[in-house]
Image (tube, rainbow, N blue to C red):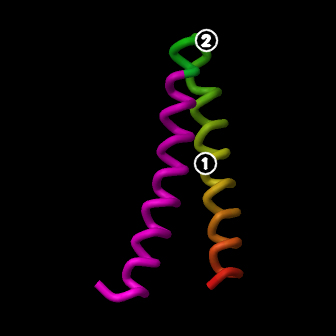
Amino acid sequence: MNRSMLKALELGFAISGMILFGALGGIWLDQWLNTTPICTFIGIFGGVASAFKYLLDWTKEN
């Protein structure tokens, strides 16, 4: 694989991982606190926000 393809894979896995981690963490908290779907939405929003921040930092770096 060439270098640009590896960078694209890194970006894709990082962004999807952040959103997935936020969503799964929110689902777990909702089940634990019995607050469906409040924590799930907060987790998804947090994951999207951190992914956007990562994307901005990544574009400045590259």
* Residue 24 against residue 55 in the figure, above or below: above
The magenta region covers 1-28
Q: Main secondary structure of the magenta part?
A: helix
Q: Which mark is residue 28?
A: none
- Name the residue that disc number 2 marks: 33
Q: Quadrant of the N terminus?
A: bottom left
Measuring from the top left, give residue 27's x and y in whole percent. 51, 27
Q: Is 26 included in the stretch rendered in magenta? A: yes
- Circle 1 — which element? helix
Q: Are marks 1 and 2 in contact (CB under 8 Å)?
A: no
Q: Give the residue type at disc 2.
A: Leu
* Residue 35 against residue 13 in the figure, above or below: above
- Residue 15 appears left or right of 3: right
Along the viewing direction, whichever of 5 and 47 lies nearer the viewer:
5
Q: Residue at x 61, y 16 (%)?
A: 35
Measuring from the top left, give residue 31's x and y in whole percent. 51, 15
* Residue 53 against residue 39 in the figure, above or below: below
- Name the residue that disc number 1 marks: 47
Number of labelled discs? 2
